[in-house]
Image: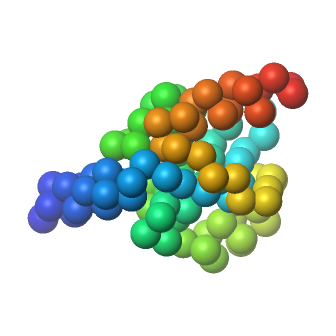
Amino acid sequence: MRSEIAIDCLCMVKESHNEAKILAYSPGRYPILVVELSSGELRTFYYETGYDSERTKSVTESWLRENAIGRHSFIEITPREVSILELRDYVRRELLEEA
């Protein structure tokens, strides 16, 4: 059952046409991104995985507001459209250069 869920999640990420909107990120040396896929699903992408789309976690809008932004100081941004394949470059260029 778990492998079926993982495969379904993987398919959703791949079927998203590689486009995503970055909604928020965690500040610091190892940013976590909260991304909205073209399907409307919210997922977290991690620095530690190289922003690998196969190693993301599904999250909800309430988690984003109450937990990420509310408790953990994630920074909400004006949504930025970026190819999923370019997330790592975006972080290096836009987030880590500023630090």
Name the side, left or right, on which 63 lies relative to 37. Answer: right
Q: Residue furthest bottom?
A: 62
Nearer-the-camera pick, 3 or 12: 12
Name the side, left or right, on which 37 lies relative to 78. Answer: left
Residue 94 lies in what quarter of the image?
A: top right
Relative height, residue 40 to residue 72 (above, below): below
Tell me residue 33's x, y (percent): 62, 47
What residue is shown at x 69% (from left), y 25% (from top)?
Answer: 92
Tell me residue 28's x, y (percent): 77, 33
Q: Residue furthest right?
A: 98
What residue is shown at x 72% (from left), y 45% (from top)?
Answer: 26
Tell me residue 42's x, y (percent): 52, 64
What residue is shown at x 49% (from left), y 71% (from top)?
Answer: 40
Relative height, residue 90 to residue 41 (above, below): above
Nearer-the-camera pick, 33 or 2: 33
Dividing the image into 4 quarters, which one contains the N terminus? bottom left
User: Residue 10: in sight, yes or no?
Assistant: yes
